[in-house]
Amino acid sequence: MSFKWWSALLSLYLCALASASADELRVCQQDPSKYAYRIELANLILARTDERYGELRIRFHDRADPAQDRCLALLADGLVDLAYVPPSDARLREFAVIPFDIHSGMLGYRLLLINRADAQRFASVNSLEDLRRFTGGFGSQWSDFPLFAHNRLPVVGVAQADNLLAMLNGRRFDYYHRGLHEAWREVAAHRDSYPLLMVEPHLALAYAQPVYFTFNRADAQLKRRFEEGLAQIRSDGSYHQLFLRHFGELVRQSRLSERRLIRLQSEAPAGLPEADSSFWLQPSAE
């Protein structure tokens, strides 16, 4: 076969690869126990914008979710197209974001997992100063890890966050904070292994913890598509419906209006818009 034939075949092959990937949105955060809502939200945005921009299907980059920093490195290298992560000053400099909290402030409300034997001790906590008598367990790579040090709350940082429940059960620390969508699910999922763990019934932490759709700066069209789709589903009520379908029951179960809220000073970047929690958060919980 002549060199020209090889060149022609190679060109066709490369074009085929390009067309195969052109209708895929590569994402590296896929664990349904963590990201089902964010994935469904992205799919809803894509569906609402496919007439103008063309059909685009989500394809997960890898079987196992990488650490958040690794996912952002893949985004920076153009190996994935979308991440959904909390903003930081460094991330805002490096990436393009849509400054809308896709969890509408909910991730900033945190409940505490504790040992049942400590329930009475936690019942006496009324302030941030009281909470400083206790030590929390924390994933050392979590974006809000520095926030606890900023608020002078003692923490034990753990590189492998999957070990935190076992360490709490072993009383290596006093509490382990979780989101409203995580607390009861994790206690229930590990009840056989850790039957003495519980969701503390009286307290909640509150701080700014937005999550933004995040893009490579070179991918302006994809960002524009998500901006348009997000504006559409917010306008027609689809966003609120999706949020409440995923989290409405958990919000009711959390009884935030009946808990003592301990507000932490946030280290979120300055100048970001405040999340709109009005459609799900009871006024007495604010």
Image: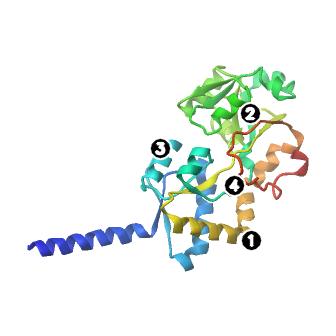
Labelled disc at residue 101: 4
Please, what secondary structure does the residue beneath circle 2 have?
strand
Say what amino acid the circle numbered 2 marks: Leu
* Secondary element type, mark 4: loop
Rendering coords of residue 12 (x, y %): 26, 74
Residue 75: x %, y % from top left: 47, 53
x, y percentage for residue 65?
49, 46
Give neighbour class at mark 1: few <14, some 14-19, many 20+ (Cα, 10 Å). Answer: few
Asked if disc 4 and disc 3 are in contact, CB closer than 8 Å, the reply is no
Q: Nearer the viewer, residue 51 or 268?
A: 268
Seen in the picture, residue 64 relative to 221 is either above or below; the reply is above
Q: Which residue is mark 2?
A: 112
Identify residue for label 3: 70
* Mark 3: secondary structure: helix
x and y, in percent, of residue 269 in the image? 67, 45
Q: CA distance from mark 1 to mark 3?
A: 34 Å
Query: Residue 21's image quarter?
Result: bottom left
